[in-house]
Image (spheres, coloured by chain):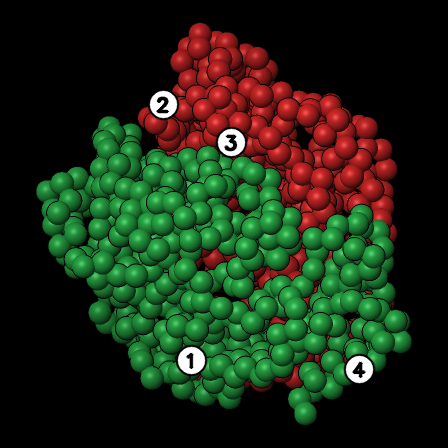
Amino acid sequence: MLQDILQKEKELFEDGVQTVLRGQENRNRRVVILKGNIVQNSRSESRGINARVGKDGLFGFASIAEYSEEAARKVLKAASENAALLAHHSENKGIVLPPSYGSGVIPTNRDIVDAEQKKIIDACRTIDAYVEKKYPDLESRTVVYTEDSQDRIIYSSDAYSGHLTTPRCYIYVMMSAKTKEGAPVELFKALGGYGCFEDNFADLEQYYPEIDQLYKKVMDKKEGVYAEAGYKTVVLGGMMGGMLAHEAVGHTVEADLVMGGSVAGPNLGKRVASDLVTMIDYAHTYNGETAPLPVYLDDEGTKAVDAELIRDGILTGYMNSRETAEKYKMKPAGNARGWTFSDEPLIRMRNTCILPGKNTVEELIESVDDGYYLIDSGNGQADLTGEFMFGVTCGYEIKNGKLGRALLDTTVTGVAFEMLKTVDMVSDKVEWSSSGFCGKKQPMAVGMGGPHMRCKIMIGGR
Amino acid sequence: MSEIREIADLFDGILKDKKLEKYTYTLVKSEKQELNVENDEFKLMRTVFNNYASIKVFKDNKMGNASGNDLSEEALKKLADDGVSAAESSPEDPCHDFAPDQGKDVFRQGIYEPDMDRFIERIKEFLAAVKKEYPQVKVMQAIGSYDRNNWISRNTNGTEFEAFTGEYSFYAGVCASDGEATTGIDGAGFTAKDLDTPFIELGEMRRCLDSISKSIHPESLEGKFEGTVILTPGCAENFLYMVIGNYISDSVVIDGTSMWLDKVGEQVASDKLTVALKPYDERIVMGERGTQDGFRAEDVTLIEKGVLKTHRLGLYASNKTGRPVVKNTGGAMVVEPGDKSIDEIIASVDKGLLMSGFSGGQPGANGEFSGVAKNSFLIEKGKIKDAVTETMVNGNLGEVVKNIRAISKELTCSGDSVMPYIAVDGIIVSGK
């Protein structure tokens, strides 16, 4: 954990400008075992200090890869000089930030506990040995351990301060098999979540049922068929629902993209989804429990609270920085975050989720005569218009209310605010994922969740 | 003597004291000065002073890797310990290794002293030109960055490479609107070693601006057809990197899932296609000089007139599989031009798409891909028609390189690659 050496540097904050000073350490651990061979075995740490100063709608930001009082003084000076240089060349007066929405100290949420590399490797080899022994007919297998953590100390001139951490770690299990034509098919599963190694992997046997389930899906997939391309009725699984919340809607309601012209701009207060759809970007708590990746304080010094985005199908809000909140007359909810010590805060999602409804998953599947059940997604992207794409790695046909053959890899697309209006059944449970990164100039760890939903969507295929 | 060289000497002393017999390390000092534009206006200036230190320790046929960004003596001692600890915890695998002695060299590339005032003025000039020539276009986000690096790499086989590099890069993400009608995002970028040319004339910038300004009112396609898709230079580069990843990279050769596992020397693509990675090409601004395995980098031809010349294997994969190592970590893609102009190629297409973006899932190991055609236009009877929306393309990477209809004689140089347009037959295009 970082030692707090920054507190007294607050005395150097310049009058008349808004300043945030941040010390940060990111840790990464990675082991990759490909078919029994350790092809990656690495540990890395990056640490440093940054300062951002805002004046007259322009920002200067500077960072140094040192964690010292001298480095803090240097970045404060350099950030001020950058803001001044920009002001010299620019006529932009931008949006002047308002007075703070509150100040105080946010308590530290938890420690980060480091694990020895040997323990990590042993855990990966145990999982690999389980897969090798139990499923020798696989064409290939890969086990990947990945851990990243953020340890941040934040001081702001006019908002909250605090020392917060966000550790997470996962073991990915990937399996590959060949179709009878000799073409490889593959699937993966991420095990683990928020917390350190011992929190997630002290008991490896708890994951064996999920690994067994993954094998079954790979065997189904090697007998799989291509989806029929076209506009289809589908049941999106919870992981796909989370991807929908993040990609299809979440990005369009990030206020910096709204300013850029996203489809959410003219739709605030209007119907954008069926009345079964409510969507929240949770800060740190969901249903009384810790959210998948809790955020208590953002990198502008804003205390994190939930951001409501859609309520009963009506677009009700955006995710904001302090600057965009001023523009749109909203309250910032703590969405401005940077990934490493050298990254400026950008508007990022936290735990973005479509809320559950009243149906069971079985009821959704039974209701479809001819369509698809789409379970897992490998990746996704979205555009300003709300046009989105998800890669579908795992899915099944639905014929007369029953699951049929598995699907080979495919892709779905649609326009978010049109597609969400076709949602007519929503399941009663939410599934979360937290292993992914969102890319938006910088990477960022995000949680996403959703229920099963019945809707219409464009699916690619042969 | 450079500061990084003094730190390397200090690190050598630490490693000697620890009696390490086999290792390779890299130390880097870097500086970034970055200008950020949001919605046509300057918004933020960012400076980053960063370091990087990475060591691979080899002990009793075991390998461990540790890295960090602290170059202090105390941190370097810890880094060495972490490397040893990682190696000791790893199982034996003699395939981990690094290159034999490559000698000593100092590389100098690009501009080491930036002209930031002129850089800012070039960005302002770009913003003004877009406003004047493309009034419906908004520069949502632009990032202009000057990056300076000094790195040194040494290993116990005797190799020592040091480099001094400095480059300008610029990326603009743009959209266009007319009333409430708005496009999606398109973007283009480039790397440059000088500021002699207006930014709007570099890389694919003009093509991108022309394309987005004609995309405000797209049409949805009905039904599906099999047609010709012309990939713009940037899109063609993305597809060819997917081909490399799926068929000739380390992991798919080690685990045997590559569909081109035993195809070296065979025709795998159209004889129109020649693909090379050329870090020494004069059109490449910052080509690799030392590979991640410690080799002096070389230009390498991967596909020549459709024949697969080599897999693109690093040293570990080479040792593991008994196949040749490639002394090139990647990047600097150069594709040989064809003999037809892009206008002639468009005129020859009965029905298809001009596609400048592909938003799709990662293709499976079998090469099957499906995704959304972004920033794309319908082509009918040799003419470019409307921009399209909600349009999907499906195919197979292996078939894409076999079914090349034509390659343009025009080349786009982004500083990072040299690419033509590539027209491909047999792609399934589907709308609602």
- The single residue placed furthest to the bottom in the displayed view is B1
Secondary structure at badge 1 equals loop
Q: Amino acid at mark 3?
A: Pro
The residues tagged by marks 2 and 1 sit, at their Cα atoms, a distance apart of: 49 Å
The answer to which of A206 and B129 lies nearer the viewer is A206
Q: Nearer the viewer, mark 1 or mark 3?
A: 3
Image height check: is B122 above or below B257? below
What chain is the red one? A
Is there one chain holding both mark 3 and mark 4?
Answer: no
Q: Give the position of the N terminus of chain A as an image quadrant.
A: bottom right
The residues tagged by marks 2 and 4 sit, at their Cα atoms, a distance apart of: 63 Å
Is there one chain holding both mark 2 and mark 1?
Answer: no
Do the numbered discs 3 and 4 sit on residues whose CB atoms are within 8 Å?
A: no
| Quarter holding residue B285 | bottom left
Image height check: is B297 above or below B255? below
In x, y percent, where is residue B418?
A: 34, 65
The answer to which of A365 and A95 lies nearer the viewer is A365
Image height check: is A289 above or below B248? above
User: Disc 2 designates what residue?
Assistant: A228
User: Disc 4 designates what residue?
Assistant: B10
What chain is the green one? B
Q: Nearer the viewer, mark 2 or mark 3?
A: 3
Q: Amino acid at mark 2?
A: Glu
Q: Amino acid at mark 4?
A: Leu
In percent of the image, x 51 and y 88: which residue is there? B113
